[in-house]
Amino acid sequence: MAAEAEAERDGGGRRFGARRAVGVVAGCLTAPLGLLYFLVGGVVLGPLLSWPRTRAYALGVLGSGAGRLVGLERRRRERFFGDRFPEAYEGEGGALRYLAVRSATGLVCAVVLALLGFGVVLAVLLVGGVARGTIGAAELLTQLVLGGVLLFLGLQGLFALNALDARLARECFGPSERELLRRRIEELSLSRAAVVGAVDAERRRIERDLHDGVQQRLVALAMLIGRARRSGERDPEQAAGLLGQAHREAQEVLAELREVAWRVYPSALDSLGLEEALGGVAQRCALPLRIAYEVAGPLPRPVETAAYFVVSEAVTNAAKHSAASAVSVRVAGVPGGPLTVRVEDDGRGGADPAGGGLTGLRGRVAALDGVLRIDSPLGGPTTIVAELPCV
């Protein structure tokens, strides 16, 4: 089976190489069409192009015809080179610029191929002369050196022209390097703003938990201890009951304070790793939680932290809002590949992707160049998948 798979891959590679070669030859054949179009169009529309009042109209007519030839080039790139471009993308410079440059490079590529073909003919004649003994050793050495240099230059020129052809296609049919850089800058700006917003929201939630939860319980604990002190001498039995109630309140305060600390940052991540930290989430979860941890090797610390908070926030939301009866978590990753975190519950669905908690998770994941997908139709189930690159 392995040998068959290897042979299939080799055959696919040969077919792909042959297809690219046919695409290069097809590009050489379509280049004269572009040159002929500019020649005929220039002759027919020349007077209109030279007059300022009709220049815009003439350029529009010329560009409309060029668009059909550009569409042919686009199909050539997709058919023979496997390129995939957006359906509606207006590249930099327009169809006329692309067709002009593409026609020139295609003609140069045709000249290079013709020279390579002529070199093959000369090589065949050289082999025939050596077989007949009409070529001496010195002449043979000279011919081999010159032929090798010309072959090297021809192949380098052919590769450079194909690289230029691919770059022109990206600029015309898809996002250019400048456009990709601009989009990347926008993504980084948005992810940075999202991280700042998520941190601020987390701080506000921590402050609210401390103020409305722990602080109120500590006030109640202080009042219980005060009542126990005042009634200690008059009614020792009542004082003992109040102290017992204060002891239970102190234990609940400690548990709630520990929960707040875990939401800030789980110390188990530093000491025990992601798997043990997720085990702590399962212990504190109010729902049955099944965790499948399928990760080989250590993970970067930022990835572990992001994965933990994705699971923790998703499980907390499921327990509070989804009316679910069970939650399943799967964390999987292989060395060199992304870490995939999948959280699914059997609740009623309808989770809002624009909600505060999920928005914060999306910002945390985007800060690592990851992707967070949320699928929560009405009636359920809710599935949250995060892909985190481990680089």
Image (cartoon, rainbow, N blue to C red):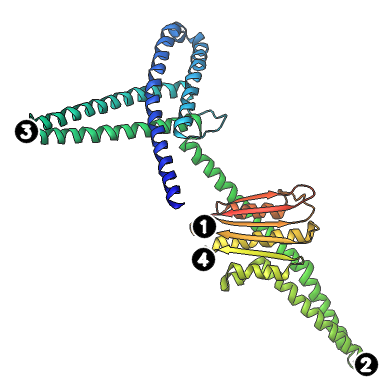
Give percent across and percent down for residue 21.
37, 31
Label 2 – label 3 distance at C-alpha: 128 Å
Give percent across and percent down for residue 79.
48, 30
Q: Pick whichever of labels 2 and 3 is earlier in the sequence.
A: 3
Select label 1 or label 3 by which is in front.
Answer: 3
Q: Is residue 303 left or right of residue 356?
A: left
Q: Residue beneath label 2, please?
A: 234
Q: Amino acid at mark 1?
A: Cys
SS at circle 2: loop
Residue at (45%, 52%) from the top-left corner? 2
Is residue 204 visible to the viewer in this orientation of the structure? Answer: no
Q: Residue beneath label 1, please?
A: 390
SS at circle 1: loop
Residue 198 picture quarter: bottom right
Select label 4 or label 2 by which is in front.
Answer: 4
Q: Amino acid at mark 3?
A: Gly
Q: Pick whichever of labels 4 and 1 is earlier in the sequence.
A: 4
- Residue 298, numbered circle: 4
**Which residue is nearer to you in this view: 2 or 118?**
2
Q: Pick whichever of labels 4 and 2 is earlier in the sequence.
A: 2
Give percent across and percent down for residue 66.
48, 18
Q: Pick whichever of labels 3 and 4 is earlier in the sequence.
A: 3
Select label 2 or label 3 by which is in front.
Answer: 3
Residue at (66%, 54%) from the top-left corner? 360
Position above or below: 351 against 312: above
Q: Residue beneath label 3, please?
A: 136
Quick one: label 2, few (<14), some, or many (20+) residues within 10 Å? few
Position above or below: 195 against 269: above
